[in-house]
Image (cartoon, grey):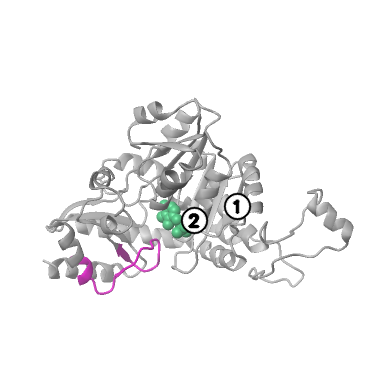
Amino acid sequence: MKDESKVIREQFPRSQNREHSVPLYLTSSFIFDDAEQCRAVFANEEEGIIYSRYSNPNTTEFIQKVCALEGAEAGLAFSSGMAAVFASFAALLKSGDHIVSSRAIFGSTHQLFTQLFSRWGITHTYVDAGKPEDWEKAVQDNTKMIFLETPSNPGLELVDLEWLGGFKKKYPHIILNIDNCFATPYLQKPVQYGFDLVSHSATKYMDGQGRVLGGVVVGKQELIDEMLFFIRHTGPAMSPFNAWVLSKSLETLPLRMDRHCSNALVIAELLEQQPEIELVRYPFLPSHPQYELAKRQMKQGGGVVTFVLKGGYEQAQRFMDSLKMILITSNLGDSRTIVTHPASTTHSKLSEEERVNLGILAGSIRISVGLEAIEDIQEDILQALRNSN
Ligand SMILES: *Cc1c(COP(=O)(O)O)cnc(C)c1O
């Protein structure tokens, strides 16, 4: 089946009620026919659902859909994207281990590396994603994991997934782990390049309507089994309600992504023609330094466009305050178009030099392009550009 069909037809087995659409299983535990069955399920001798911290029909269905899209063997669902990303490290690494990571990663993941893992004896080295020699130099004897995001937030830099898959073959014991949230498995499938783990904030495009938090990690069966021990006993489980919402949302993920991407490309092209704007970054713009790579590893360019306004922070502020329809909020991947100013918000804790390294300038604006009529998004952006000058 094609992706568009899998997300609709992948379904938890129907109950004796013969429901068409999968119901919400709001129950913390599940019953057994007798004491012997209970013993056998606990002993893993018989399959069965025990307790919603371990698994639940709604979370199972959500996970199966993500596995089908990613082409992954198994997966686990989490209460948030950060719970998923954290578990992908904490369940598999120990004191003394080392992580090699691309420099441009989500702010909270950076905080994990620098503030928490440093306390627990897990070290990291950041590399410039586009420089192969950087990855080579960073690997140490105790390196256990390579982690990255592509496209990065908000600079929209790419990492060559095929190259990295080949690089990893030299180090079979290193786990290759990617946060695939920006691209979604509809646009980009890291497992096909040899990635071991793929994590997601389901809060973004998977929900797509700014309602619930969620996270998911999919990948190799043996790694997911090892992670299962961690989540069973630390409890970052996704709620059945959120899983039910997210599983329904996935039914429209391909349809929504097509529209996010086509709207974003139009906005990126429009912005590139405006005299008030210094630079526009979008993976599927021919002016993107990694345009060829983007075309190779992504089906479309994604829903996020980043641009730099001439005139720095004051101009960026005036532009954002002049928008009428588009609101300022820190989410992304929503049906509503969203604008943020990374330098004063998500990346304000970094030094100016660190920000410039990530391509974040005082005049940088990130737009998560929504599903509204393209004419309305265009009109709001153009009037704000004119009225803020
Ligand atoms: C939002 C986001 C996260 C964190 O997800 P939450 O669901 O907010 O916890 C992690 N990685 C990336 C790339 C994100 O955009």
* SS label for mark 1: strand
Give me the disc on residue 384.
none
Camera-nearest residue between 265 and 56: 56
Can you give x and y, in whole percent of width and height, for residue 189 in the image? 48, 45
The reply, left or right, for residue 257 in relation to residue 346 is: right
Does residue 373 lie above or below 310 as drawn? below
Can you give x and y, in whole percent of width and height, for residue 295 in the image? 35, 43
Give me the disc on residue 76.
1
Image point (80%, 49%), residue name: 43
Decide whether the magenta segment is chiefly helix, strand or loop.
loop
Per the rendered image, the range of residues in magenta is 319-339
Lower position in the chain sequence, tag 2 or tag 1: 1
Camera-nearest residue between 98 and 226: 98
- Residue 335 belongs to magenta span: yes
Structural distance between the alpha carbons of marks 2 and 1? 12 Å
If the picture is divided into quarters, which one holds ligand 1?
bottom left
**Taking the image as drawn, is residue 182 in sight?**
no
Please state, as top left, top right, bottom left or bottom right, where the C terminus lies in the image: bottom left
Say what amino acid the circle numbered 1 marks: Leu
Camera-nearest residue between 148 and 277: 148
**Taking the image as drawn, is residue 318 in sight?**
yes
Image point (58%, 56%), residue name: 77
Say what amino acid the circle numbered 2 marks: Gly
Q: Which residue is mark 2?
A: 81
